[in-house]
Protein backbone atom coordinates (compact mmCIF):
# COMPACT_ATOMS: atom_id res chain seq x y z
CA UNK A 1 0.00 0.00 0.00
CA UNK A 2 1.20 3.47 -0.93
CA UNK A 3 0.93 4.80 2.65
CA UNK A 4 2.57 8.17 1.96
CA UNK A 5 0.05 9.14 -0.74
CA UNK A 6 -1.90 12.40 -0.68
CA UNK A 7 -5.31 10.76 -1.15
CA UNK A 8 -6.90 7.71 0.44
CA UNK A 9 -9.04 7.02 -2.63
CA UNK A 10 -8.99 8.42 -6.17
CA UNK A 11 -12.14 7.72 -8.21
CA UNK A 12 -10.91 7.17 -11.77
CA UNK A 13 -13.69 7.53 -14.33
CA UNK A 14 -15.66 9.98 -12.18
CA UNK A 15 -17.34 11.57 -15.22
CA UNK A 16 -18.82 8.24 -16.40
CA UNK A 17 -22.28 7.06 -15.36
CA UNK A 18 -21.14 4.71 -12.58
CA UNK A 19 -18.18 6.90 -11.58
CA UNK A 20 -20.54 9.82 -10.95
CA UNK A 21 -22.64 7.64 -8.66
CA UNK A 22 -19.52 6.58 -6.75
CA UNK A 23 -18.51 10.22 -6.29
CA UNK A 24 -22.03 11.11 -5.15
CA UNK A 25 -22.00 8.25 -2.63
CA UNK A 26 -18.58 9.27 -1.29
CA UNK A 27 -19.74 12.84 -0.88
CA UNK A 28 -23.03 11.94 0.79
CA UNK A 29 -21.58 9.26 3.07
CA UNK A 30 -18.11 10.56 3.93
CA UNK A 31 -18.25 14.26 3.08
CA UNK A 32 -15.00 16.05 2.30
CA UNK A 33 -11.76 15.21 4.08
CA UNK A 34 -13.35 13.93 7.30
CA UNK A 35 -12.81 10.19 7.48
CA UNK A 36 -11.69 9.69 3.88
CA UNK A 37 -9.54 12.01 1.79
CA UNK A 38 -10.72 11.39 -1.77
CA UNK A 39 -10.35 12.90 -5.23
CA UNK A 40 -11.99 12.61 -8.64
CA UNK A 41 -10.07 11.71 -11.80
CA UNK A 42 -10.88 11.53 -15.50
CA UNK A 43 -9.75 12.57 -18.96
CA UNK A 44 -11.31 16.05 -19.03
CA UNK A 45 -10.89 18.74 -16.37
CA UNK A 46 -13.96 20.59 -17.68
CA UNK A 47 -16.12 17.47 -17.38
CA UNK A 48 -14.78 16.78 -13.89
CA UNK A 49 -15.68 20.31 -12.81
CA UNK A 50 -19.15 19.96 -14.34
CA UNK A 51 -19.81 16.67 -12.53
CA UNK A 52 -18.50 18.06 -9.25
CA UNK A 53 -20.82 21.06 -9.52
CA UNK A 54 -23.80 19.00 -10.73
CA UNK A 55 -23.46 16.57 -7.81
CA UNK A 56 -23.14 19.40 -5.29
CA UNK A 57 -19.66 18.26 -4.30
CA UNK A 58 -17.45 20.85 -2.59
CA UNK A 59 -14.85 22.60 -4.71
CA UNK A 60 -12.24 21.49 -2.19
CA UNK A 61 -12.45 17.94 -3.64
CA UNK A 62 -9.38 17.67 -5.85
CA UNK A 63 -9.66 16.93 -9.57
CA UNK A 64 -7.00 14.91 -11.39
CA UNK A 65 -6.63 14.67 -15.17
CA UNK A 66 -5.55 11.16 -16.16
CA UNK A 67 -5.92 9.05 -19.28
CA UNK A 68 -5.11 5.38 -19.94
CA UNK A 69 -3.41 6.44 -23.19
CA UNK A 70 -1.07 8.87 -21.34
CA UNK A 71 1.31 6.83 -19.13
CA UNK A 72 2.76 9.89 -17.38
CA UNK A 73 -0.68 11.12 -16.26
CA UNK A 74 -1.62 7.63 -15.11
CA UNK A 75 1.60 7.27 -13.12
CA UNK A 76 1.10 10.65 -11.43
CA UNK A 77 -2.44 9.70 -10.40
CA UNK A 78 -1.31 6.30 -9.06
CA UNK A 79 1.48 7.87 -7.03
CA UNK A 80 -0.99 10.31 -5.45
CA UNK A 81 -3.35 7.58 -4.20
CA UNK A 82 -3.36 4.92 -1.53
CA UNK A 83 -6.09 3.25 -3.60
CA UNK A 84 -7.32 3.85 -7.15
CA UNK A 85 -11.00 2.98 -7.62
CA UNK A 86 -11.61 2.56 -11.34
CA UNK A 87 -14.89 2.36 -13.21
CA UNK A 88 -13.21 2.74 -16.62
CA UNK A 89 -14.08 -0.35 -18.66
CA UNK A 90 -14.12 -2.57 -20.57
CA UNK A 91 -11.00 -3.29 -18.54
CA UNK A 92 -9.50 -5.45 -21.26
CA UNK A 93 -9.44 -2.34 -23.45
CA UNK A 94 -8.49 0.34 -20.90
CA UNK A 95 -7.42 -1.34 -17.67
CA UNK A 96 -4.03 -2.95 -18.22
CA UNK A 97 -1.82 0.18 -17.96
CA UNK A 98 -3.51 1.10 -14.65
CA UNK A 99 -3.03 -2.37 -13.14
CA UNK A 100 0.62 -2.29 -14.21
CA UNK A 101 1.14 1.18 -12.69
CA UNK A 102 -0.52 0.20 -9.39
CA UNK A 103 1.44 -3.06 -9.17
CA UNK A 104 4.67 -1.18 -9.89
CA UNK A 105 4.18 1.65 -7.39
CA UNK A 106 2.52 -0.27 -4.54
CA UNK A 107 -0.86 1.43 -4.91
CA UNK A 108 -4.03 -0.43 -4.02
CA UNK A 109 -6.62 -0.97 -6.76
CA UNK A 110 -10.32 -1.91 -6.91
CA UNK A 111 -12.53 -2.30 -9.97
CA UNK A 112 -15.88 -3.65 -11.19
CA UNK A 113 -14.40 -6.25 -13.52
CA UNK A 114 -16.21 -9.37 -14.61
CA UNK A 115 -13.88 -10.06 -17.54
CA UNK A 116 -12.45 -13.47 -16.67
CA UNK A 117 -9.90 -13.75 -19.47
CA UNK A 118 -8.42 -10.32 -18.72
CA UNK A 119 -8.28 -11.04 -15.00
CA UNK A 120 -6.51 -14.32 -15.79
CA UNK A 121 -3.97 -12.37 -17.88
CA UNK A 122 -3.44 -9.73 -15.18
CA UNK A 123 -2.82 -12.37 -12.48
CA UNK A 124 -0.20 -14.03 -14.69
CA UNK A 125 1.47 -10.74 -15.60
CA UNK A 126 1.37 -8.69 -12.37
CA UNK A 127 0.71 -10.82 -9.29
CA UNK A 128 4.41 -11.27 -8.53
CA UNK A 129 5.04 -7.54 -9.01
CA UNK A 130 2.11 -6.63 -6.72
CA UNK A 131 3.39 -8.97 -4.01
CA UNK A 132 6.80 -7.33 -4.22
CA UNK A 133 5.55 -3.71 -4.18
CA UNK A 134 2.79 -4.26 -1.58
CA UNK A 135 -0.04 -3.30 -3.94
CA UNK A 136 -3.34 -4.99 -3.06
CA UNK A 137 -5.26 -5.41 -6.31
CA UNK A 138 -8.88 -6.52 -5.93
CA UNK A 139 -11.02 -7.25 -8.97
CA UNK A 140 -14.81 -7.64 -9.07
CA UNK A 141 -15.87 -5.22 -6.31
CA UNK A 142 -19.38 -4.58 -7.62
CA UNK A 143 -22.42 -6.74 -8.31
CA UNK A 144 -19.92 -9.08 -9.84
CA UNK A 145 -18.97 -10.55 -7.48
CA UNK A 146 -19.43 -9.13 -3.97
CA UNK A 147 -22.92 -10.40 -2.97
CA UNK A 148 -21.98 -13.91 -4.12
CA UNK A 149 -18.33 -14.12 -3.02
CA UNK A 150 -19.07 -12.64 0.41
CA UNK A 151 -22.36 -14.54 0.62
CA UNK A 152 -20.52 -17.87 0.37
CA UNK A 153 -17.93 -16.70 2.93
CA UNK A 154 -20.71 -15.60 5.30
CA UNK A 155 -22.50 -18.93 4.92
CA UNK A 156 -19.33 -20.97 5.41
CA UNK A 157 -18.45 -18.97 8.52
CA UNK A 158 -21.79 -19.99 10.02
CA UNK A 159 -21.22 -23.58 8.90
CA UNK A 160 -17.96 -23.67 10.85
CA UNK A 161 -19.59 -22.04 13.87
CA UNK A 162 -22.46 -24.54 14.01
CA UNK A 163 -20.91 -27.76 12.70
CA UNK A 164 -17.10 -27.22 12.76
CA UNK A 165 -16.98 -28.30 9.12
CA UNK A 166 -17.58 -26.40 5.88
CA UNK A 167 -20.35 -26.94 3.36
CA UNK A 168 -18.90 -29.21 0.69
CA UNK A 169 -21.81 -28.21 -1.56
CA UNK A 170 -23.26 -24.71 -1.86
CA UNK A 171 -26.13 -23.75 -4.13
CA UNK A 172 -26.50 -20.07 -4.99
CA UNK A 173 -29.92 -19.06 -6.32
CA UNK A 174 -31.02 -15.59 -7.42
CA UNK A 175 -34.52 -15.43 -5.97
CA UNK A 176 -35.54 -11.96 -7.17
CA UNK A 177 -33.87 -9.10 -8.99
CA UNK A 178 -35.11 -5.77 -10.35
CA UNK A 179 -32.87 -3.42 -12.31
CA UNK A 180 -30.67 -3.37 -15.37
CA UNK A 181 -27.10 -4.43 -15.91
CA UNK A 182 -24.71 -1.62 -16.63
CA UNK A 183 -23.73 -0.55 -20.13
CA UNK A 184 -20.16 -1.31 -19.14
CA UNK A 185 -21.09 -4.90 -18.22
CA UNK A 186 -22.79 -5.37 -21.58
CA UNK A 187 -19.81 -3.90 -23.45
CA UNK A 188 -17.39 -6.08 -21.47
CA UNK A 189 -19.40 -9.19 -22.28
CA UNK A 190 -19.40 -8.41 -26.00
CA UNK A 191 -15.66 -7.67 -25.98
CA UNK A 192 -14.89 -10.91 -24.10
CA UNK A 193 -16.88 -13.04 -26.55
CA UNK A 194 -15.28 -11.32 -29.53
CA UNK A 195 -11.84 -12.10 -28.09
CA UNK A 196 -12.83 -15.71 -27.37
CA UNK A 197 -13.82 -16.16 -31.00
CA UNK A 198 -10.36 -14.96 -32.07
CA UNK A 199 -8.36 -16.85 -29.44
CA UNK A 200 -9.25 -20.48 -28.62
CA UNK A 201 -7.17 -20.32 -25.40
CA UNK A 202 -9.54 -17.64 -24.08
CA UNK A 203 -12.53 -19.94 -24.54
CA UNK A 204 -10.74 -22.57 -22.44
CA UNK A 205 -10.27 -20.01 -19.65
CA UNK A 206 -13.96 -19.08 -19.79
CA UNK A 207 -15.08 -22.72 -19.63
CA UNK A 208 -12.86 -23.79 -16.72
CA UNK A 209 -14.47 -23.04 -13.32
CA UNK A 210 -10.98 -23.06 -11.75
CA UNK A 211 -9.27 -20.79 -14.32
CA UNK A 212 -8.59 -18.12 -11.66
CA UNK A 213 -7.62 -20.56 -8.90
CA UNK A 214 -3.86 -20.38 -9.42
CA UNK A 215 -3.42 -23.80 -10.99
CA UNK A 216 -5.71 -25.68 -8.59
CA UNK A 217 -8.19 -28.02 -10.29
CA UNK A 218 -11.06 -29.22 -8.12
CA UNK A 219 -13.93 -31.62 -8.71
CA UNK A 220 -16.35 -31.42 -11.61
CA UNK A 221 -18.83 -28.57 -11.16
CA UNK A 222 -22.49 -28.25 -12.28
CA UNK A 223 -22.55 -26.20 -15.48
CA UNK A 224 -25.88 -24.51 -14.69
CA UNK A 225 -26.61 -23.86 -18.36
CA UNK A 226 -29.84 -25.85 -18.69
CA UNK A 227 -33.30 -25.47 -17.20
CA UNK A 228 -33.88 -27.72 -14.18
CA UNK A 229 -36.30 -28.26 -11.33
CA UNK A 230 -34.63 -27.56 -7.99
CA UNK A 231 -36.36 -29.48 -5.22
CA UNK A 232 -34.26 -27.80 -2.52
CA UNK A 233 -35.87 -24.46 -3.40
CA UNK A 234 -39.26 -25.72 -4.66
CA UNK A 235 -38.77 -23.89 -7.93
CA UNK A 236 -37.63 -24.19 -11.50
CA UNK A 237 -34.19 -22.71 -12.18
CA UNK A 238 -32.71 -21.08 -15.27
CA UNK A 239 -29.13 -20.12 -16.23
CA UNK A 240 -27.92 -16.99 -14.41
CA UNK A 241 -25.78 -14.57 -16.40
CA UNK A 242 -23.45 -13.74 -13.51
CA UNK A 243 -22.58 -17.36 -12.75
CA UNK A 244 -19.69 -17.62 -15.21
CA UNK A 245 -17.71 -14.92 -13.38
CA UNK A 246 -18.96 -15.44 -9.81
CA UNK A 247 -18.17 -19.16 -9.69
CA UNK A 248 -14.57 -18.54 -10.79
CA UNK A 249 -14.07 -15.77 -8.22
CA UNK A 250 -15.47 -17.97 -5.45
CA UNK A 251 -13.12 -20.84 -6.34
CA UNK A 252 -10.25 -18.32 -6.42
CA UNK A 253 -11.26 -17.08 -2.96
CA UNK A 254 -11.21 -20.63 -1.66
CA UNK A 255 -7.75 -21.24 -3.16
CA UNK A 256 -6.26 -17.94 -1.93
CA UNK A 257 -7.51 -18.53 1.61
CA UNK A 258 -6.01 -22.04 1.74
CA UNK A 259 -9.19 -24.00 0.86
CA UNK A 260 -11.30 -23.40 4.00
CA UNK A 261 -14.32 -24.57 1.96
CA UNK A 262 -12.44 -27.82 1.19
CA UNK A 263 -10.59 -29.03 -1.88
CA UNK A 264 -13.72 -30.93 -2.92
CA UNK A 265 -15.98 -27.84 -2.76
CA UNK A 266 -18.81 -27.72 -5.34
CA UNK A 267 -20.68 -24.50 -6.14
CA UNK A 268 -23.13 -23.29 -8.75
CA UNK A 269 -25.50 -20.38 -9.37
CA UNK A 270 -28.86 -20.25 -11.09
CA UNK A 271 -31.94 -18.01 -11.25
CA UNK A 272 -35.20 -19.19 -9.67
CA UNK A 273 -38.34 -18.68 -11.77
CA UNK A 274 -41.04 -20.27 -9.59
CA UNK A 275 -42.85 -23.61 -9.25
CA UNK A 276 -45.16 -25.51 -11.60
CA UNK A 277 -45.75 -25.11 -15.30
CA UNK A 278 -45.54 -21.31 -15.11
CA UNK A 279 -42.12 -21.55 -13.44
CA UNK A 280 -40.91 -24.02 -16.05
CA UNK A 281 -42.11 -21.81 -18.91
CA UNK A 282 -40.43 -18.77 -17.34
CA UNK A 283 -37.16 -20.68 -16.92
CA UNK A 284 -37.25 -21.78 -20.56
CA UNK A 285 -37.86 -18.19 -21.63
CA UNK A 286 -34.88 -16.98 -19.58
CA UNK A 287 -32.69 -19.70 -21.09
CA UNK A 288 -33.57 -18.61 -24.64
CA UNK A 289 -33.28 -14.85 -24.07
CA UNK A 290 -30.22 -12.64 -24.61
CA UNK A 291 -29.14 -11.89 -21.01
CA UNK A 292 -27.37 -8.71 -22.08
CA UNK A 293 -30.49 -7.22 -23.65
CA UNK A 294 -29.30 -7.40 -27.25
CA UNK A 295 -29.59 -4.15 -29.18
CA UNK A 296 -31.62 -2.62 -26.33
CA UNK A 297 -28.80 -2.99 -23.79
CA UNK A 298 -27.53 0.28 -22.31
CA UNK A 299 -24.36 1.68 -23.83
CA UNK A 300 -21.33 2.54 -21.68
CA UNK A 301 -22.15 5.85 -20.00
CA UNK A 302 -25.90 5.22 -20.09
CA UNK A 303 -28.02 3.96 -17.25
CA UNK A 304 -31.33 4.07 -15.42
CA UNK A 305 -32.88 7.14 -13.80
CA UNK A 306 -32.59 7.77 -10.09
CA UNK A 307 -36.17 6.57 -9.60
CA UNK A 308 -35.38 3.33 -11.44
CA UNK A 309 -32.23 2.82 -9.39
CA UNK A 310 -34.13 3.43 -6.16
CA UNK A 311 -36.83 0.94 -7.18
CA UNK A 312 -34.28 -1.79 -7.89
CA UNK A 313 -33.27 -4.59 -5.53
CA UNK A 314 -31.98 -8.15 -5.42
CA UNK A 315 -32.47 -11.20 -3.21
CA UNK A 316 -29.89 -14.00 -3.39
CA UNK A 317 -30.39 -17.29 -1.56
CA UNK A 318 -27.70 -19.76 -0.53
CA UNK A 319 -27.98 -23.35 0.66
CA UNK A 320 -24.95 -25.05 2.23
CA UNK A 321 -24.74 -28.80 2.78
CA UNK A 322 -21.98 -30.56 4.75
CA UNK A 323 -20.65 -34.05 4.04
CA UNK A 324 -22.88 -35.28 6.87
CA UNK A 325 -25.95 -33.69 5.28
CA UNK A 326 -26.30 -30.81 7.75
CA UNK A 327 -27.83 -27.75 6.08
CA UNK A 328 -27.83 -23.98 6.54
CA UNK A 329 -29.58 -21.39 4.40
CA UNK A 330 -28.51 -17.77 4.05
CA UNK A 331 -29.75 -14.70 2.20
CA UNK A 332 -27.98 -11.66 0.73
CA UNK A 333 -30.14 -8.66 -0.22
CA UNK A 334 -29.38 -5.30 -1.81
CA UNK A 335 -31.58 -2.22 -1.60
CA UNK A 336 -30.89 -0.66 -5.03
CA UNK A 337 -30.65 -1.86 -8.62
CA UNK A 338 -27.68 -4.22 -8.91
CA UNK A 339 -25.82 -2.73 -11.87
CA UNK A 340 -25.60 0.89 -10.71
CA UNK A 341 -27.13 1.90 -7.39
CA UNK A 342 -25.82 -1.02 -5.34
CA UNK A 343 -22.60 -1.46 -7.33
CA UNK A 344 -21.51 2.15 -6.80
CA UNK A 345 -21.88 1.75 -3.03
CA UNK A 346 -20.12 -1.61 -2.94
CA UNK A 347 -17.00 -0.47 -4.78
CA UNK A 348 -16.72 2.70 -2.68
CA UNK A 349 -16.87 0.71 0.56
CA UNK A 350 -14.38 -1.81 -0.87
CA UNK A 351 -11.80 0.92 -1.52
CA UNK A 352 -12.27 2.42 1.94
CA UNK A 353 -12.17 -0.99 3.63
CA UNK A 354 -8.93 -1.86 1.85
CA UNK A 355 -7.07 1.29 2.93
CA UNK A 356 -8.63 1.77 6.38
CA UNK A 357 -9.30 -1.74 7.70
CA UNK A 358 -6.83 -4.04 5.95
CA UNK A 359 -3.48 -2.47 6.77
CA UNK A 360 -1.88 -5.84 7.51
CA UNK A 361 -2.88 -7.42 4.19
CA UNK A 362 0.15 -8.25 2.04
CA UNK A 363 0.49 -7.27 -1.60
CA UNK A 364 -1.08 -9.45 -4.27
CA UNK A 365 -4.10 -9.91 -6.52
CA UNK A 366 -7.23 -10.80 -4.56
CA UNK A 367 -10.97 -11.36 -4.55
CA UNK A 368 -13.22 -9.37 -2.18
CA UNK A 369 -13.63 -12.35 0.18
CA UNK A 370 -9.93 -13.19 0.34
CA UNK A 371 -8.85 -9.55 0.79
CA UNK A 372 -11.50 -8.03 3.06
CA UNK A 373 -13.83 -10.85 4.09
CA UNK A 374 -16.27 -10.32 6.94
CA UNK A 375 -14.82 -6.85 7.63
CA UNK A 376 -16.29 -5.74 4.30
CA UNK A 377 -19.57 -7.52 5.10
CA UNK A 378 -19.84 -5.35 8.22
CA UNK A 379 -19.16 -2.15 6.22
CA UNK A 380 -21.69 -3.06 3.55
CA UNK A 381 -24.36 -3.76 6.15
CA UNK A 382 -23.62 -0.55 8.06
CA UNK A 383 -23.41 1.80 5.08
CA UNK A 384 -24.31 0.33 1.69
CA UNK A 385 -27.80 -1.13 2.02
CA UNK A 386 -26.81 -4.81 1.91
CA UNK A 387 -28.05 -7.40 4.39
CA UNK A 388 -26.46 -10.79 5.08
CA UNK A 389 -28.61 -13.12 7.15
CA UNK A 390 -28.85 -16.75 8.24
CA UNK A 391 -32.35 -18.08 7.56
CA UNK A 392 -34.18 -19.51 10.57
Image (cartoon, rainbow, N blue to C red):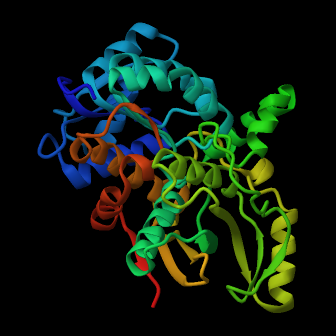
Q: Quadrant of residue 362?
A: top left
* Residue 125, placed above or below residue 33: above
* Residue 226, placed above or below residue 243: below
Judged from this view, the residue extending furthest toward the top is 72
Look at the image and tell me in which quarter the C terminus lies.
bottom left
Task: Give the x, y percent position of residue 222.
Answer: 77, 63
Q: Residue at x 51, y 69 (%)?
A: 166
Q: Quadrant of residue 386?
A: bottom left
Residue situated in front as seen by the camera: 241 or 45: 241
Task: Give the x, y percent position of residue 141.
Answer: 46, 47
Task: Give the x, y percent position of residue 193.
Answer: 79, 37
Q: Residue at x 63, y 70 (%)?
A: 169
Judged from this view, the residue extending furthest toward the left is 34
Residue situated in front as seen by the camera: 98 or 30: 98
Look at the image and tell me in which quarter the N terminus lies.
top left
291 relative to 289 in the view: left or right = left
Task: Give the x, y percent position of residue 282.
Answer: 81, 78
Q: Residue at x 51, y 50 (%)?
A: 253
Residue situated in front as seen by the camera: 234 or 183: 234
Q: Residue at x 86, y 32 (%)?
A: 197
Residue situated in front as seen by the camera: 366 or 96: 366
* Residue 24, placed above or below residue 379: above
Q: Quadrant of residue 12?
A: top left
370 relative to 121 in the view: left or right = left
Amino acid sequence: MNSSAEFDVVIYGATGFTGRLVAEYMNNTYGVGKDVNWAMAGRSLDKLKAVRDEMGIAKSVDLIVADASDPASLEAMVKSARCVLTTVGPYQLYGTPLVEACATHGTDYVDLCGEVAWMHDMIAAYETKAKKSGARIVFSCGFDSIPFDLGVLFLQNEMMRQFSTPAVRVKGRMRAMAGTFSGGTAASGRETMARAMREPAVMAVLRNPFSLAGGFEGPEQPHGMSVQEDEDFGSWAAPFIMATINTKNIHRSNALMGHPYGRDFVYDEMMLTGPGEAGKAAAEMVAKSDPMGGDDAPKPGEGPSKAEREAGHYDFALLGITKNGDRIRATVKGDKDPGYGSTSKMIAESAICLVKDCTDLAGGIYTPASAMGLTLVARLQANAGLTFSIDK
